[in-house]
Amino acid sequence: MRNIRITVSYDGTSYSGFQTQPHGNTVQDYLERAIRMLSGETVKITSSGRTDAGVHARAQVINFTTASQIPAERWCLALNSRLPKDIVALRADEVPLSFHARKSAKRKTYSYTIRTARIPDTFQRRYQFHHPNPLDVDAMRDALAAILGTHDFSSFCSVKTVAESRIRTIYDAWIVEETDQMSVEPNQPGQLRFYFTGSGFLYNMVRILVGTLIQIGEGKRPAEEMAAILRGRNRALAGPTAEAHGLMLWNVEYAE
Amino acid sequence: MRNIRITVSYDGTSYSGFQTQPHGNTVQDYLERAIRMLSGETVKITSSGRTDAGVHARAQVINFTTASQIPAERWCLALNSRLPKDIVALRADEVPLSFHARKSAKRKTYSYTIRTARIPDTFQRRYQFHHPNPLDVDAMRDALAAILGTHDFSSFCSVKTVAESRIRTIYDAWIVEETDQMSVEPNQPGQLRFYFTGSGFLYNMVRILVGTLIQIGEGKRPAEEMAAILRGRNRALAGPTAEAHGLMLWNVEYAE
């Protein structure tokens, strides 16, 4: 048997999330179907972690074992011709049998995109949360500093979280201010992109962090509250869960 | 009566082009419907020019006359709440009654985007023509130089063109090489963006120019042929019409 790792990108708009569900229509279902069409095998793929309905991935990582002799470099084009256009295999590698897309992952990065211009950008509408009012980026950056390091993130996960430990490490978190591609006048502010790199993320963690940061950016809460929310270990202390469609699994890193 | 000018952006994927057709489903139909819902008037809008089925606009310009007293700055948000999400009013201005979106236009710019990376970018799939092989950008730049200035563009327009004169002026034409946002390795080449600024464009003109440039970029024709094709004034001399979905009406300029 061989272990194949595939980096996959998807537009989550039309799917009920990554992971197989009773009612179907998941990214996992389409990937397993394409693999079956290609190799004739019924495989169960492992991912670096699920993503919710409407959440996108620039570079999700999956793996599966196969008896197929198809060379690694042939998998991408062969799968892409059997996948819907909103799911794309970016690269394939043969990896040691010990590799596990979730357990071997060292760091994950998510991005969250907010459009702050008054008018939406129709070309990015599926990938940006539209918040048509300016946000105080300095205050949000101050708040982000409080979550760096290793903490119990109970305040920033869904009450439905089943993980035994809520301790996670955030290695880095930053905000990029991007100009508005839709503005006829050059160099107008238009969108904010948040990035979070961590050891792993709890259920809804990035979306609750962003929902809380938006309240800070709006001036509804001071930046200093972020540390107190974290210490409180209580979901009710944090802000709302930001909408799914602004979220994107950006990258998953493994030890070489 | 007042004359209202509106800059409109649209994702043309789902529409049968800009201009009203017997079978409906055009951008114009939705704009006129939204104006009717808002002002109660049945108006016929004028645009800077039609765009074909599947072609996008970052900043199309329309105008119409109205008896409505709605202030110009209120039109955008009011129309956007009555438009599908893939059509967006970006800005509205009250202009002199003499303003005509097509006849008053001085310069138009179109962009055409080609993804040259091997794997498609699913997030841009509606807005990029995928050509998964490298193109010789220097050769295409040499060829672009030949079309600058005032020429008879009969070789670069559809045989269905009804315009009396095929003489147009290209003020500027350039290519921007963009890095691949989907690549996990930084600074990989990924897409080319062509821009064409001219006095006006004939039917299919940008798409035939791009189809010809692709052949030059592939090495199928030498860059020097561009000038000969132009001189020949014969559509059969040029390359194929590039696919609609890579094309975007970028900007329309008027005298101030």
Image (cartoon, coloured by chain):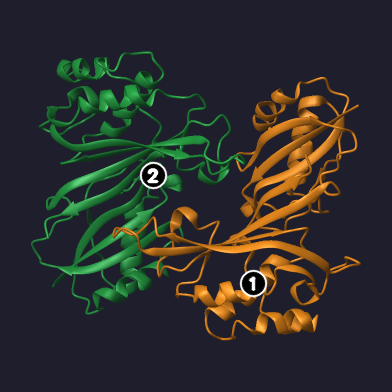
Chain colours: A green, B orange
Task: Identify which amino acid the numbered label 2 is placed on.
Answer: Ser
Is residue B193 visible in the rendered image? The answer is yes
**Discs 1/2, front:** 1
Give the total number of marks visible in the rendering. Answer: 2
Residue type at the position of mark 1: Ala
Q: Position of residue A127 (x, y in %)?
A: 45, 42
Q: Mark 1 and mark 2 in contact? Answer it, CB < 8 Å.
A: no
Q: Quadrant of the C terminus of chain A?
A: bottom left
Tell me the residue at 17%/15% (across/down): A232
Can the viewer see residue B202? no
Q: Which residue is mark 1?
A: B145
Q: Chain of mark 1?
A: B
Q: Nearer the viewer, residue B247 or A70?
A: B247
* Residue at the (79%, 71%) spot, across then down: B151
Q: Is residue B108 above or below residue A168?
A: below
- In-front residue for pair A227/A138: A138
Quadrant showing the N terminus of chain A: bottom left
Residue A61 percent across, percent down from the top left: 25, 56
